[in-house]
Image (tube, rainbow, N blue to C red):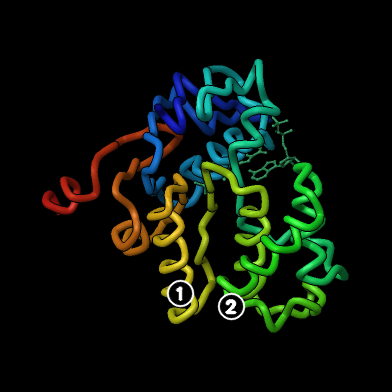
Amino acid sequence: MAAVSIKQLTKVYANGFQALAGVDLQIQEGDFFALLGPNGAGKSTLIGILSTLVNKSAGQVEVFGHDLDTDPAGLKRCLGVVPQEFNFSVFEHCFDILVTQAGYYGVKASIAKERAEECLIQLGLWDKRDTAARMLSGGMKRRLMIARALMHQPRLLILDEPTAGVDIELRRSTWDFLAELNRKGTTIILTTHYLEEAEHLCRHLAIINHGHIVRNASMKSLLKEL
Ligand code: ADP
Ligand code: ADP
């Protein structure tokens, strides 16, 4: 089954700017997929539409068979999103942020607490469980956002520039975490303008520029050409 099926997706912003121009894209279940492109290419717009935060202008989007137009709730349940910008309630403590998030998806409190514990440990944030989110370093905030996106155990995880501004050591540990998550079965899509990140993690990639997919290939075949 396709994890993501996008047909002729177009986005024209209210000011008339066309950020996506008829994008076609299929991503298979279990894949680790990179959306690579320069700033302004349309990556965040595409992710925003997939995660229901941005309205599309035209085209069709399905996630695990749930159509964005007819079953947005079903689509949302399948995915976890890690935005680029930190968007927590800054006074809440890390553990509570995760438990609250699970509650939005109807996860039972006892299970939510177990999962929060597991996620905090795996992401190296257990020491910070009772710390307010605003006290975390940039890299820790990013990892907390990953933990939060995983609380309802989505089949698809989408990350927008997951390691932008993260130092090299933390980047490596985030990479290891994501690779392991994918190995255990979660389909992952990330955006990056950083080829090394895509090369290290991803099996397939699409290159986007000016709202068009200009290349869509396996990482192996692409690297042979470079
Ligand atoms: P939509 O068409 O999805 O309703 P809008 O065009 O109304 O989106 O813009 C959504 C928000 O993005 C607005 O608050 C707007 O100020 C902001 N915005 C406008 N232009 C840009 C831009 N070039 N880059 C990023 N954000 C922008
Ligand atoms: P990327 O994530 O690849 O950097 P974006 O999807 O953020 O690209 O932006 C694609 C283009 O759309 C950019 O030229 C950006 O300025 C423009 N854009 C983004 N949001 C808006 C908006 N709300 N209104 C108008 N233009 C926008």
Question: Where's ligand 2: which quadrant?
Answer: top right
Few, some or many residues within 10 Å of mark 2 (<14, 14–19, 20+): few
What number is the disc on residue 173?
1
Q: Residue 148, how many percent across, how many down?
A: 68, 58
Report whether 21 appears left or right of 44.
left
Report whether 208 appears left or right of 158.
left
What number is the disc on residue 57?
none
Residue 108 vs residue 82, the one in the foreground: 108
For the C terminus, the image quarter is: bottom left
- Label 2 and label 1: CA atoms lie apart by 9 Å
Report whether 207 appears left or right of 144.
left
Q: Residue 133, how many percent across, how many down?
A: 78, 72
Query: What amino acid type is highlighted by mark number 1?
Result: Ser
Q: Residue 23, how many percent across, how many down?
A: 43, 26
Q: Residue 132, how many percent across, how many down?
A: 82, 75
Task: Please tell me which residue is depicted at 64% across the width and 77% down the height of the picture.
Answer: 125
**For numbered disc 2, what is the local secondary structure?**
loop
- Above or below for 92 versus 27: below
Residue projecting furthest to the left: 224
Query: What amino acid type is highlighted by mark number 2?
Result: Gly
- Above or below for 43 versus 100: above
- Above or below for 134 versus 43: below
Q: Nearer the viewer, mark 2 or mark 1?
A: 2
What number is the disc on residue 124?
2
For the N terminus, the image quarter is: top left
Residue 21 vs residue 29, the one in the foreground: 29
**For numbered disc 1, what is the local secondary structure?**
helix
Task: Please tell me which residue is depicted at 45% across the width and 81% down the height of the picture.
Answer: 169
Q: Earlier in the sequence, mark 2 or mark 1?
A: 2
Residue 173 vs residue 198, the one in the foreground: 173
